[in-house]
Amino acid sequence: MVVISVIVETSAKENSGKYPAAFLSERELQSFSTNGFLATTGISPSAELSEIRRIVADLIARRVGEKEGSLFDTMESSTSSDAPTSIQLTNPSNYNAWLLETDYVRNATRIAHQLVPNCFLSCDFVLLKRAKVGLGTPWHQDEAYFDPQYDHATLTFWMPLQDVGPNDGCMIYVPGSPQMGVLAHRSLHDDPHTHAFECAVSFNQDQSVTVPLQAGDCAVHGQRTLHCSTNNKSSVDRYAYLLTFVSTPTLSKNPRQAPWLEQRESIDQQTKRAWMLRGGVFVLLLRKIRRIRSLTPSMYVVYLKRGVKDILRVRR
């Protein structure tokens, strides 16, 4: 395993901490294309970081989104009675719109458009690993979570709200792993009641790269990049705020098989479906419209089909 430091062209930044329209150099663009990930510094100023952390910590403390299936433990089975230690809050910006008005979002959008032109911000979420007990996310590819009937490019921006290293829950990547295609996955510990997936095939981890970051730095990866995070062994809760950018989904000409998606029945899925049946599907669609006002008609069809599919599954 290799540990790298973050190297960027700091001269490209403005004194305000914002990035110009074309921040990434040709070398960095090529590095992302080859390796499937990239690390950069100072994507969010310190004052903004403090406010983001205050907001998301308050939302989680008040258990906002729990009844919608948006707040859950990613690592525990739905039958577990243990206190949550690896918490996800999906789309915290639904509950505080200021989160979408940050330098972080503006700068990430500029970088995302260099990597995937015409992409848009699809969702945001917070990952909290509790001090000393927060378990690292297992090896996986983000595309393992996606509907295999559709093709689209995806970028994930992973920004820690405090300094992270191997003992604090930092990210680890396998360079070049997107070239492997979408690998087989399974529910964590083969338990379909858990939210998390893990890669189900063996691969060479000797070439993996550990990426320590300071608060406000950021790691970016694509949907087929193999990655995981370390356990949080530190005495400080580890918060990471993530943004996901996607290109417009299109129906796949050769849909792949993803049996792990059909087998999973996690508690957050059950909660979300029940909420949607109570009228949440319309709330969800309105949120999509407000978030992405320039959606094409085909995108509305995609979101509607996904909502109907979720409702039908809960009626089984």
Image (cartoon, grey):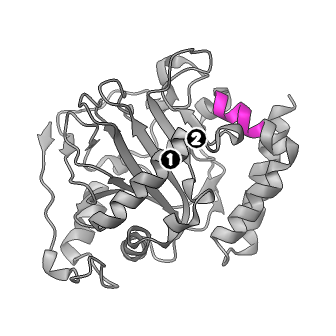
- Label 2, on which residue? 62
- Is residue 241 found inside the magenta-colored segment of the image? no
Question: Residue 251: which numbered mark, if any?
Answer: none
Which amino acid does the dot numbered 2 rest on?
Answer: Arg
Residue 63 falls left or right of residue 284: left
Instruction: Give the residue at x 39% y 69%.
Output: 108
Residue 141 can be seen in this image: no
Tell me the crowding category of disc 2: few under 14, some 14 to 19, or many 20 or more residues within 10 angstroms, Cα based.
few
186 and 255: which one is in front?
186
Q: Quadrant of residue 303?
A: bottom right
Which stretch is magenta?
A: 266-273
User: What secondary structure is marked by label 1?
Assistant: helix
- The N terminus appears in which quarter of the rendering? top left
Total marks in image: 2
Residue 126 can be seen in this image: yes
Instruction: Give the residue at x 48% y 18%.
Output: 189
Q: Position of residue 132 (x, y in %)?
A: 29, 25
Q: Position of residue 163 (x, y in %)?
A: 22, 48
- The majority secondary structure of the magenta stretch comes to helix
Residue 284 falls left or right of residue 215: right
Which amino acid does the dot numbered 1 rest on?
Answer: Asp
- The C terminus appears in which quarter of the rendering? top right
User: What secondary structure is marked by label 2?
Assistant: loop
- Label 1, on which residue? 58
Q: Position of residue 93 (x, y in %)?
A: 57, 59
Tag 1–tag 2 contact (CB < 8 Å) = yes
Between the C-alphas of marks 1 and 2, the distance is 6 Å
Tell me the crowding category of disc 1: few under 14, some 14 to 19, or many 20 or more residues within 10 angstroms, Cα based.
few
Q: Position of residue 202 (x, y in %)?
A: 33, 27
Instruction: Give the residue at x 67% y 39%.
Output: 69
